[in-house]
C-alpha cells in the first residue's frame, strides 16, 4: 500500500473517531455525573511492539498482528477524564453527589459496575436504583432497600437512615489506577485493572446535590473545529495521493502501449 495514502487514511480514521467522542461530550454536557471522553492514539511502531508476545516452542507468535503496514497512527482507546464536575443543589433527598474521588457501586446484568451519576430513585419495593434501573449496592455487597415511610437522611459517609433506623451504607469505592476505568455507556464504568485494586473511597456524600458534567462546552466546540480541519487536511492528502497514483497508472499504460 502507498505509504502516503495509508498515513492520510489513518489520520482520517483517527480524527473521525475523535469527532464522534467530542460530539458525544457535547450531547451530554447536561448529563448528571457524565465525564468528558477523549481518544488516545498510538503510532504503528508502538502498536506493533505491544502486539508482540512470547514465541511458543514452535517459534510461532500466538497472536496475529493483522495487516502489516508502516507509518500513520491509529485510535487506541477511549477514556474518561475523571475531574470533579460542579455540584448543584436540587433538594431531592435521593440526589447524591460525591465530592472527591470515588464511584457508587451498582449491580448490572454484566456484574458490578461503577458510576458518578447519583440521581437515584426508588422502585415499588423500595430498592434504590439508578436512572437506568440498576440497583445501588451497599457496603455489604447487596442492593439497598428502604422500607420505611419517614424522611431519608444520608450522611457524608453514605450511611442511610430512615425512621430513626439505619437502612444501610452506600458502597463507594476508588481504584489504584483511575486510568483503567473504561466507559461502558449509560454513565457506567468497568475496571480493566487487576483484581484486589478496589479501595475504600474518602469521597464525601452530599445529599440533595447532583454532580453535573465536567465537559467544558466552549473548549469542546473549539476542539471540534480543530479536529474537523485536521480531518479535511488528511482528506486532501488522500485525494492528492489518489491523483498521483492515477497519473502513474495512466503514464505506465501509455508507455506500455507505445
Image: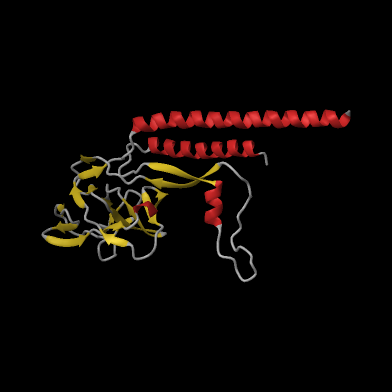
Residue 239 in view in this figure: yes
In this view, which residue lies farthest toward the bottom? Answer: 57
Q: Quadrant of the C terminus?
A: top right
- The location of residue 17, given as percent across then percent down, is 50, 40
Q: Nearer the viewer, residue 2 or 83?
A: 2
Q: Quadrant of residue 233?
A: top right
What residue is shown at x 30% (from left), y 44% (from top)? 83
Looking at the image, the residue that sits furthest to the right is 258
Which of the colour schemes (rainbow, by chain, secondary structure, one colour) is used? secondary structure
Nearer to us in this view, 207 or 41: 41
Q: Is 190 above or below relative to 37?
A: below
Quarter of the image with the N terminus is top right
> Seen in the image, is 57 located left or right of residue 93?
right
- Residue 87 shown left or right of residue 112 in the figure: left
Q: Is residue 94 left or right of residue 30?
A: left
Q: How many marks?
A: 0
Q: Is residue 68 above or below residue 240?
A: below
Q: Residue at x 41, y 42 (%)?
A: 38
Q: Nearer the viewer, residue 109 or 214?
A: 214
Q: Position of residue 214 (x, y in %)?
A: 31, 40
Say above or below: 199 vs 229.
below
Determine which quarter of the picture holds residue 200. bottom left
Residue 63, image x, y percentages: 59, 60
Q: Which residue sits at x=88%, y=30%?
A: 257
Residue positioned 39% across, 63% down in the render: 194
Is residue 123 visible in the rendered image? The answer is no
Amino acid at each position: 500500500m502507498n505509504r502516503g495514502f495509508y498515513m492520510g487514511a489513518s489520520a482520517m480514521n483517527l480524527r473521525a473517531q475523535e469527532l464522534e467522542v467530542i460530539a458525544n461530550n457535547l450531547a451530554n454536557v447536561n448529563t448528571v455525573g457524565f465525564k468528558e471522553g477523549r481518544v488516545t492514539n498510538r503510532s504503528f511502531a508502538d502498536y506493533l511492539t505491544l502486539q508482540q508476545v512470547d514465541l511458543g516452542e514452535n517459534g510461532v507468535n500466538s497472536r496475529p498482528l493483522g495487516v502489516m503496514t508502516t507509518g500513520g497512527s491509529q485510535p487506541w482507546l477511549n477514556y474518561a477524564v475523571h475531574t470533579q464536575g460542579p455540584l448543584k443543589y436540587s433538594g431531592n433527598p435521593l440526589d447524591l453527589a460525591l465530592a472527591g474521588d470515588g464511584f457508587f457501586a451498582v449491580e448490572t446484568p454484566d456484574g458490578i459496575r461503577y458510576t458518578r451519576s447519583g440521581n437515584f430513585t426508588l422502585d415499588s419495593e423500595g430498592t434504590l436504583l439508578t436512572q437506568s434501573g440498576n440497583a445501588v449496592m451497599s457496603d455489604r455487597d447487596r442492593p439497598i432497600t428502604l422500607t420505611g415511610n419517614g424522611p431519608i437522611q444520608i450522611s457524608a459517609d453514605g450511611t442511610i437512615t430512615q425512621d430513626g433506623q439505619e437502612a444501610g451504607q452506600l458502597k463507594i469505592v476508588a481504584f489504584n489506577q483511575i486510568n483503567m476505568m473504561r466507559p461502558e455507556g449509560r454513565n457506567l464504568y468497568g475496571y480493566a485493572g487487576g483484581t484486589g485494586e478496589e479501595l475504600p473511597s474518602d469521597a464525601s456524600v452530599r445529599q440533595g446535590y447532583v454532580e453535573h458534567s465536567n465537559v467544558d462546552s466552549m473548549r469542546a466546540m473549539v476542539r471540534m473545529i480543530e479536529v474537523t480541519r485536521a480531518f479535511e487536511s488528511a482528506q486532501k492528502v488522500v485525494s492528492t495521493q489518489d491523483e498521483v497514483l492515477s497519473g502513474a497508472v495512466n503514464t505506465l499504460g501509455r508507455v506500455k502501449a507505445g
